[in-house]
């Protein structure tokens, strides 16, 4: 598997990208990585490390996409940017997938305009593996579509089912709709109508509504919502996790008894931190397009980049895109 990495996407680029790429190669997560970005800077960074130099190449790109760039116009205005060139390399079959921790809107726009949508898919969505008490669940959409129709949510459920099936090898993933109550009559007009569509769909295994409090229990394998709700939920959970660990650290610093307790419970603390760490899951997959793009967090560290490469390579091996095309063709 060959993965193109936008080496100037993250907030601290290119350090996390370079080191993440090297770790991915050393851990045999893919066969080859194409680092896309400013050649001189990348060459100097790579000189600091020992790795198989035949498996990491540089694709020169002179421009960088910033948070202020208009997502829709970047393909025309910044043709030589690290993001655009990475995505175009995938379109040209030079690589099997793309990873970027850059401007989310720009990554989505460039991917959609370059790859195009899978036939019969109304809108792409961002799908992310989410940690739970049992096993990771797929949540979508987490930010690509603020305003959705019931038809969009039904397609998100189908795409999420395919993702769960080919990424986690689940034969019949259970799908739930995120709502303010478990009853079918709860929620706004969108989710009420979406509930009916999901219940009648022959393409998914729908188990009904779940509430926000149920997300971390792992009740479902796929959770569907619109991008506004999904994005707010995701960032809230991330913020709560960070706040809890910060409060624990502060209490431990102030209380010597707590310090002793912390030493005794260190294995549990380490386990929880790892399970709730977004870096463990790499990033969100843009589903519904004719290509593989994994979008990592802007503040992604080395581990997050490495795991995003792992996700992209695993999706490429699974044949997810091919199976998604075939599934949506059968729905006509």
Image (spheres, rainbow, N blue to C red):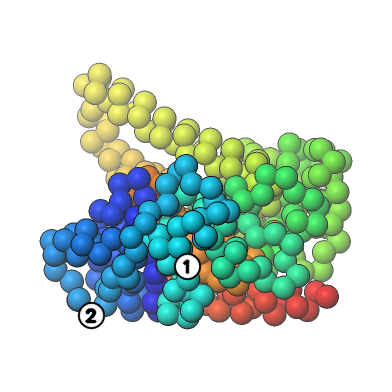
Q: Is 138 or 64 nearer to us in this picture?
A: 64
Residue at 21% across / 21% down in the picture?
A: 256
Indicate whether 242 appears above or below 52.
Answer: above
The secondary element bearing badge 1 is classed as: helix
Instruction: Give the crowd class for mark 2: few <14, some 14-19, many >=20 residues within 10 Å.
Output: few
Disc sitting over residue 54 in the figure = 2
Q: Which residue lies furthest to the top in this view?
A: 254
Residue 58 x %, y %: 28, 70
- Nearest to N terminus: mark 2 or mark 1: 2
Question: Left or right of 286: which side holds 156?
Answer: right
Residue 321 x %, y %: 59, 75
Residue at the spot of label 1:
87
Asked where in the image residue 232 lies, by quadrant, the reply is top right
The residues bearing labels 2 and 1 have C-alpha atoms spaced at a distance of 22 Å
Residue at 81% across / 38% down in the picture?
A: 188
Q: In which quarter of the image is the N terminus?
A: bottom left
Residue 25 x %, y %: 28, 71
Question: Left or right of 259: which side holds 110?
Answer: right
- Is residue 19 visible from the viewing direction of this image? yes
Q: Is 142 or 38 nearer to us in this picture?
A: 38
Question: Left or right of 176: which side holds 40?
Answer: left
Instruction: Give the crowd class for mark 1: few <14, some 14-19, many >=20 residues within 10 Å.
Output: many
């Amino acid at each position: 598997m060959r993965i193109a990495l936008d080496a100037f996407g993250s907030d601290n680029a290119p350090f996390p990208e370079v080191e993440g790429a090297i770790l991915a190669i050393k851990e045999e997560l893919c066969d080859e990585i194409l680092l896309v970005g400013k050649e001189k800077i990348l060459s100097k960074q790579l000189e600091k490390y020992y790795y198989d130099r035949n498996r990491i190449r540089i694709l020169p790109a002179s421009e960088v996409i910033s948070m202020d760039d208009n997502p829709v116009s970047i393909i025309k205005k910044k043709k030589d940017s690290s993001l655009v060139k990475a995505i175009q390399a995938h379109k040209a079959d030079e690589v099997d997938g793309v990873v970027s921790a850059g401007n989310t809107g720009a990554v989505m726009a460039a991917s959609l305009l370059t790859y195009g949508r899978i036939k019969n898919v109304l809108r792409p969505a961002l799908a992310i593996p989410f940690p739970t008490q049992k096993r990771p669940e797929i949540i979508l959409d987490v930010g690509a579509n603020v305003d959705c129709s019931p038809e969009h949510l039904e397609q998100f459920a189908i795409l999420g089912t395919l993702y769960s099936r080919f990424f986690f090898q689940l034969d019949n993933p259970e799908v739930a709709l995120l709502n303010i109550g478990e009853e079918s009559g709860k929620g706004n007009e969108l989710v009420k109508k979406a509930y009916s569509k999901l219940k009648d769909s022959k393409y998914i295994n729908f188990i009904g509504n779940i509430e926000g409090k149920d997300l971390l229990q792992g009740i479902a394998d796929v959770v569907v919502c619109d991008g506004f709700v999904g994005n707010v939920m995701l960032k809230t959970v991330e913020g709560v996790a960070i706040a809890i660990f910060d409060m624990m650290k502060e209490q431990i610093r102030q209380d010597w008894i707590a310090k002793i307790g912390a030493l005794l419970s260190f294995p549990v603390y380490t386990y929880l931190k790892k399970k709730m760490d977004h870096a463990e899951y790499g990033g969100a997959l843009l589903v519904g397009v004719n290509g593989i793009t994994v979008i990592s967090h802007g503040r992604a560290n080395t581990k997050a980049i490495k795991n995003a490469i792992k996700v992209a390579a695993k999706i490429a091996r699974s044949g997810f895109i091919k199976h998604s095309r075939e599934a949506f063709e059968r729905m006509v």
